[in-house]
Every structure is written in structure tokens, then in C-alpha cells.
Image (spheres, helix red, strand yellow):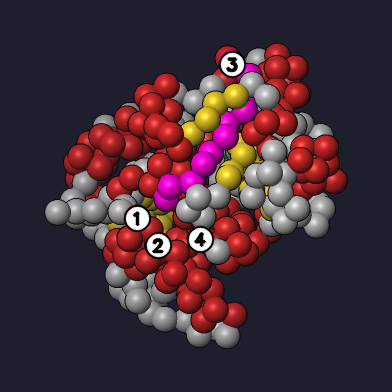
Amino acid sequence: MTRHFLTLADLSVTEIEAVIQRAIRLKDAFRRRELQQTCAGRVLAMIFEKSSTRTRVSFETAMAHLGGHAVFLSQQDSQLGRGEPIEDTARVLSKMVDGVMIRTFEHARLTRFAEYSSVPVINGLSDSYHPCQLLADLQTFYELKGAIKGKKVAWLGDGNNMCNSWINAARIMDFHLHVAGPAEYRPAPEIVRRAGPNITLTGDPRQAAAQADLVVTDTWASMGQEDGKENRQALFKPFQVNEEIMALAAADAVFMHCLPAYRGAEVSAGVIDGPRSVVWEEAGNRLHAQKALLEFLLG
Ligand code: CP
Ligand code: NVA
């Protein structure tokens, strides 16, 4: 059966741990400029219906390092932009490439694509989830602080695609996620319900941050949700990750953000550019975590 990676739940705990360990080894090999041709002759198609810097560059570079090739398709320049059905695109690409990464809007578009694809489909971000980012984030946590099981993670801000993926991670990897944000922008109830006791929702950012091992946030207006940005700013303001919030976290707590970040909005410049921020290591790990994922799915 074809394996896809549409949400973190498509991999078991054991598989996620194996991918992370492999990513750490690949990172070490990369530092020594030892590149392994584990995806030689393999081709990954990448469909972008939204903008990207990190996801595009990391997947394209990963395929080059592993001896394969990546094909970039934007919605405007492919027949998708002229209305060719997603089901037809999936069947055609399956005849030519070994895997497809898609960044799109509704998550249902991705699941529909996967239904018609006979090659692995990877979620490069949908309105609902961003699982590739979570692989890199979990790798970063593991490298800096060891196993995440039983730890406290604070999410401050929007109940968006990144928040949903952190909720999935909390359930699968068994840590405690405290989500603090305005009542109007809470994560989807069915996703919260599934996570059960691993998640706590609160309107109090200080309570979420208290003694947390990791504090995470993201933009207050995700791609496609930029309308009414000013109104959002006012609602989200109490949930900014700043020095005062970080002072409540554990003494050795770190700060993560998937990027792009907006200094002075969801995070203060002092925090993102300060000593507890691990965002550059986190961004760099996209390359290694995705290499490990590509090997797992296409290698
Ligand atoms: N974090 C992330 O996915 O960044 P891009 O939008 O630049 O790909
Ligand atoms: N939540 C953000 C993540 C960007 C990588 C968005 O969807 O725009």
C-alpha cells in the first residue's frame, strides 16, 4: 500500500523516532559533506499553491543531495491554474514521478490528491496541518533537550495549521501541550478532542508558559487569512511571546517559530533574536528531517 504523509498521524511513534534519528545522522554526514545517494534516480514533483521559502529550498536541496531530482510546479504555471482536476493531475504525475509534495489551501484537496495518487504524497502545508515542520521541530527539541515525552510545551497565538500539528504531536509523542489564544481563534474542536489529556486550552498566556520546556508561536495571520489582519492584531496582542513570557518558562526553556516571523507582533525582537531562540537551527533542520522522510517514503 502506498504510504502518504498528510499529517503526523500517518507515521507511528516508532517511525517518527526512526525518521528523527536518521535526520540527526544525515545532518552529521552533511557537516562532513558526505552525501549519500539514497534517492538516486528518484524524482519528486512539488506543487506550490501558496508561497514558500524554506519548504521549497529544503525539499529541492534534499533531493539534490540524495542523488534525485525535484520538479517545481506553481499553480499559475501548471494546468492546475487553468482548472485541470486534481484527480487527473494525481494520476498523470503518478505515471512519471516517485513522489509528490503539495502545499495548498483546503486539506481535503490534499486527501483527494492522495486518493488518486499511486505514489507517496507529502503535505508541504495545508490550511489544517504542517507536519513536515513538526518533524524538524521534534528533531530540534530532541537534539537540544532529549526526549519530548512528558515535557511541557506552550503554544501561544493562533489555533492554526501549526498549532494543529503540535496537537497531533502531543498526542502521538505523549507530551503536554498548553494552547493559549483568543477564544475566537481556538484550534478545531475535533482535533483537540482527539488529543484528550495531552492538551490544555487556556485564555491565559502566563499559565501556558509557566515552567514550559518549550515556547512556540507562529504568525497571527496565516497565508490565505490576511483579511481583517488589524482586527486580529488587537485580539492576539496579549499572546505575544516576549521577555516577560519567557521569564515564566523553565530556566532552560527554548523558543521555536516555524518562520516567517513578524517581530513586534507574535514575538518580540528580543526573544526571537535572543539567546533562547533556536529558530535558525530549527529552520536548518527542515533539510535533514525531510531527507529522512524522503528516504523513508521514496528511497
Ligand atoms: N516554515 C515554512 O514552511 O516556511 P516556508 O513558508 O518559507 O516554506
Ligand atoms: N501558519 C503559517 C505557516 C507558514 C509556514 C501559514 O500557514 O501561513
Q: Residue at x 75, y 24 (%)?
A: 238
Q: Residue at x 68, y 44 (%)?
A: 211
Helix, strand or loop status at disc 1: helix
Residue reaching furthest to the left: 1
Residue 41, above or below 199: below
- Calculate the distance from the C-alpha at mark 1 to the C-alpha at mark 4: 12 Å
Q: Are marks 1 and 3 in contact (CB under 8 Å)?
A: no
Q: Is disc 1's CB within 8 Å of ligand 1?
A: no
Helix, strand or loop status at disc 4: loop
Q: Is residue 269 magenta?
A: no
Q: Which residue is mark 3?
A: 183
Q: Tell which of 264 and 240 is nearer to you.
A: 240
Q: Quadrant of the C terminus?
A: bottom left
Q: Is disc 4's CB within 8 Å of ligand 1?
A: no
Helix, strand or loop status at disc 2: helix
Determine crowd level at label 4: few under 14, some 14-19, many 20+ residues with C-alpha closer than 10 A.
Answer: some
Mark 1 or mark 3, which has the lower sequence index? 1
Q: Which residue is mark 4?
A: 147
Provide the residue span drawn in magenta.
173-183
Residue 31 visible to an observer of this rendering: yes
Q: Tell which of 285 and 192 is nearer to you.
A: 192
Determine crowd level at label 2: few under 14, some 14-19, many 20+ residues with C-alpha closer than 10 A.
Answer: some
Q: Amino acid at mark 4?
A: Ala
Task: Look at discs 4 and 2 and give the one toward the viewer.
Answer: 4
